[in-house]
Image (cartoon, helix red, strand yellow):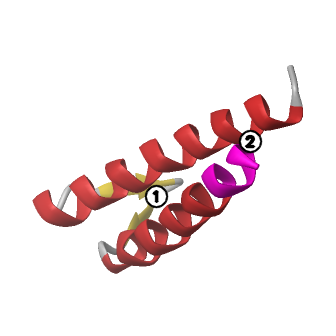
Amino acid sequence: MEKNQLLMLASVIFGIVAVLHLLRSIFSWEADIGGFNVPVWYSYVAVVVAGYLSWEMYGAGRK
């Protein structure tokens, strides 16, 4: 695969992750990882981070 294709693939993956975290925030889905109850506010941060990474990789993949 070319560099641009890999960047676009990563952009799509990060975009999906951002959408899933947004849905978790909206519907207040619980998440337990190794017995640790992950607070919903973690998803707020994850939406911003994953959305930013998706946007940046999309822009880099278009160049």
Q: Main secondary structure of the magenta part?
A: helix
Instruction: Identify the amino acid type marked 2.
Output: Leu
Q: Secondary structure at mark 1?
A: loop
| 10 Å crowding of disc 2: few (<14), some (14-19), many (20+) | some
Residue 35 bears which disc, if any? 1
| 10 Å crowding of disc 1: few (<14), some (14-19), many (20+) | few
Q: In the rendered image, which quarter is residue 22 located in?
A: bottom left
Please tell me which residue is depicted at 34% across the width and 48% down the height of the picture.
Answer: 20
Q: Secondary structure at mark 2?
A: helix
Q: How many marks?
A: 2
Instruction: Identify the amino acid type marked 1.
Output: Gly
Counting residues from the start of the chain, the first of labels 2 and 1 encountered is 2
Please tell me which residue is depicted at 23% across the width and 54% down the height of the picture.
Answer: 23
Residue 19 bears which disc, if any? none
Residue 11 horizontal side relative to residue 42, left or right: right
- In terms of depth relative to the viewer, which is nearer, 60 or 22? 60
- In terms of depth relative to the viewer, which is nearer, 33 or 35? 33
Q: Residue furthest left?
A: 27
The boundaries of the magenta stretch are: 57-63
- The location of residue 14, given as percent across then percent down, is 55, 49
Residue under label 2, please give it: 7
2 and 1 marks in contact (CB < 8 Å): no
Placement of the N terminus among the 4 image quadrants? top right
- The location of residue 17, given as percent across then percent down, is 46, 48
Please tell me which residue is depicted at 15% across the width and 63% down the height of the picture.
Answer: 26
Q: In the rendered image, which quarter is residue 38 located in?
A: bottom left
Please tell me which residue is depicted at 72% across the width and 45% down the height of the picture.
Answer: 61
